[in-house]
Image (cartoon, grey):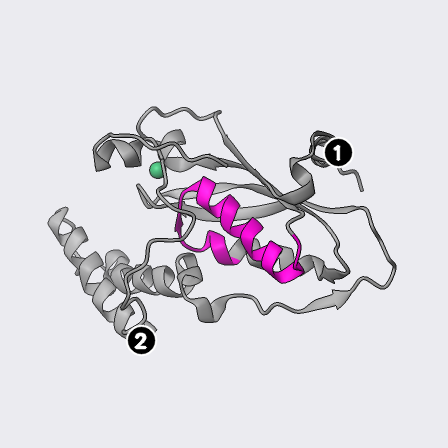
Amino acid sequence: MKIENTTNTNDDLGENHVGTSSDTPMKADAFKLSDNEKIDIIQSDVRHIMETLGLDLTDDSLNGTPKRVAKMFVNEIFGGLNPDKKPSASVFDNKYKYGEMLVEKNITVYSTCEHHLLPIVGKAHIAYISNGTVVGLSKMNRIVDYFAKRPQVQERLTIQIVKELQKVLNTDDVACVIDAKHLCVNSRGIRDIESSTVTSEFGGQFKNKEIKREFLDYISLETKF
Ligand SMILES: [Zn+2]
């Protein structure tokens, strides 16, 4: 995937949802603080934002919000920043000698746009061709969820999922398509309710036109059960 380089200001960069690297930009001392220390600091930051907006935090309904948001940031929606939470890489021998592509589609994606901190909601579709090892199906869901639980741009999320599966499965033959709605586009700014963003990354054999076509055909099959 190509991420275009622009000469815009940082503000424009964010508004256009352009990412700068396939690695999440992290500070060298990102894990110097414990999760609990981070929650304490973020809690007072959220309190500060709310008070600055003029809200009365002595109100019963608002009182618990700073702590609730801080815990949600650290433990849940940004929990995937912590490499300790990466799903373990258990793989199995491909006993059945299944040599065709395996597709896992409609994996739910809940992520957060790093430019606005608003939700990205959509579906990921993943395929790989086994090189002798296979991975549990739920593992693919967990890998998607781990990388989704970061401030993200959709392009980077797509690439990070593919790179991780390439490493786990020891093959380049991995592909991912994500179709998602960005609430920063749907609910504010241009307020386009219907639009969604599709990103794709095709590794190894998936760069081959026919194999790519096969994967995309599987994705568009309607699942009936
Ligand atoms: Zn955004």
User: Do callouts 2 and 1 mark residues in contact (Cβ within 8 Å)?
Assistant: no
Task: Identify the secondary structure beneath mark 1.
Answer: helix
The amino acid beneath tag 1 is Glu
Relative to residue 211, is residue 98 depicted above or below? Answer: below
The amino acid beneath tag 2 is Ser
Residue at point 37% right, 61% down?
72
Mark 2: is the Cβ under 8 angstroms from ligand 1?
A: no
- Residue 214 image label: 1
Relative to residue 68, is residue 122 depicted above or below? Answer: above
At label 2, counting other C-alpha atoms closer than 10 Å, the crowd grade (few under 14, some 14-19, many 20 or more) is: few
Q: Nearer the viewer, mark 2 or mark 1?
A: 1
At label 1, counting other C-alpha atoms closer than 10 Å, the crowd grade (few under 14, some 14-19, many 20 or more) is: few
Task: Identify the secondary structure beneath mark 2.
Answer: loop
- Compare residues 105 and 187 and report the one nearer the observer: 105
Residue at point 74% right, 31% down?
210
Magenta: main secondary structure equals helix
- Compare residues 209 and 195 and report the one nearer the observer: 209
Q: Looking at the image, in which quadrant does ligand 1 appear?
A: top left
- Compare residues 57 and 194 and report the one nearer the observer: 194
Stretch of the chain drawn in magenta: 146-171
Q: Is residue 165 magenta?
A: yes
Percent across and percent down for residue 52 are 11, 50
Q: CA distance from mark 2 to mark 1?
A: 46 Å
Q: Residue 158 vs residue 82: left or right?
A: right
Sequence-first tag of 2 and 1 = 2
Percent across and percent down for residue 159 are 51, 46
Tell me if residue 180 can be seen: yes
Percent across and percent down for residue 39 are 28, 68
Residue at point 33% right, 54% down?
25
Name the residue tied to disc 2: 34
Residue at point 70% right, 30% down?
209
